[in-house]
Image (spheres, rainbow, N blue to C red):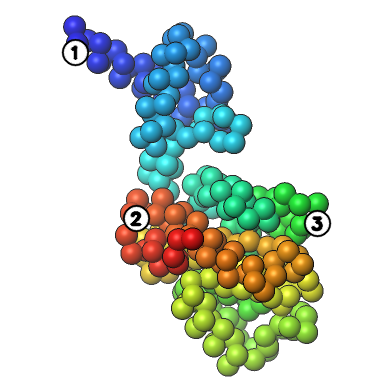
Amino acid sequence: MASQNGTQAIDRAVALLTHVIDGQDAVSFAELAAASGLAKSTTSRLLTALERHHLIRRDGDGQYWPGEVFVRYAWRGTSGTDLVAVAQPYLEKLGDLTGETINLGIVTAADGGRGVAEPIAQVESRYLLGATNWVGLTVPLHCSALGKVLVAFGAAEIPPGPLERLTDRTIVSRAALSAELATVRDQGYAVSDEELEPALIAIAAPVFAGGDTAIAALSVSGPSPRLTPDQIPVTGRICARIAGQLSAALTGLSGPRAGRNGPAC
């Protein structure tokens, strides 16, 4: 009888898990309880066990999604959609910690084949005064935090030719930019200090998927009155820590790669 009871519990848990995985969107507790026909107490107990083993996860509204085990298995490094699915909870966590606009960015080719950084997912700032919606836009590599960190960690190269000056703080000397990128590699995050737009501060850290080359970057951006010089290194360390956690989720590892993104704070 004990064996049958154990099998029954597994069958019920698998049925709940299947409902979550097969759903096109997040699934609520009420929907899962109704679909399974189980008592709410049984449903809650089984969902808690599935969540504890990272087979499902809950978002901020308490809705259920496939957990890290499944999105990590699905991740193959070829689909921006898959990357966003894995990264979304980390973007939300970074947004909760900083209150600022959060972006996930990758390298793409602009007109003429010149490499640029492109945000592919965003979490909005909690403040009324926040950064713009960057998703679908592109930014130059040499003067954006996303671009600098992607170049510093091998995902892109600065295109040949003169570096465009977008503000009076944009770095347009290749020697100065090379020194800046060395600093980025040393500290584990990049800063764009009013180099892309006046009064806009952005901080970004690299995301890895098991190799030495960044596959993406996480950034925090906001206005200079909030992201002050004293606040930048604190935010940089937080950004690097969350990027390291995302890297570990993408690789299934928690070793040197995650640690490369900087110390916990």
Quadrant position of the N terminus in the picture: top left
Distance between the alpha carbons at the discs numbered 3 and 2: 36 Å
* Front residue of this view, candidates 188 and 171: 188
Q: Position of residue 118 (x, y in %)?
A: 63, 63
Pointer 1 residue: 3
Q: Which mark is residue 254?
A: 2
Classify 10 Å Cα crowding around label 3: few (below 14), some (14-19), many (20 and above).
Answer: few
Q: Are marks 3 and 2 in contact (CB under 8 Å)?
A: no
Q: Quadrant location of residue 116?
A: bottom right
* Front residue of this view, candidates 250 and 223: 223
Q: Which mark is residue 129?
A: 3
Count how many numbered circles sit on residues in the image.
Answer: 3
Lower position in the chain sequence, tag 2 or tag 1: 1
Q: Residue drawn 44% across and 13% down?
A: 41
Which SS class for mark 1?
helix
Distance between the alpha carbons at the discs numbered 1 and 3: 59 Å
Q: Position of residue 139 (x, y in %)?
A: 68, 69
* Circle 1 or circle 3, nearest the eye: 3
Q: Is residue 215 visible?
A: no
Classify 10 Å Cα crowding around label 1: few (below 14), some (14-19), many (20 and above).
Answer: few
Q: Is residue 242 visible?
A: yes
Lower position in the chain sequence, tag 1 or tag 3: 1
Left or right position of 9 against 56: left
Which SS class for mark 3?
loop
Q: Residue drawn 68% across and 63% down?
A: 221
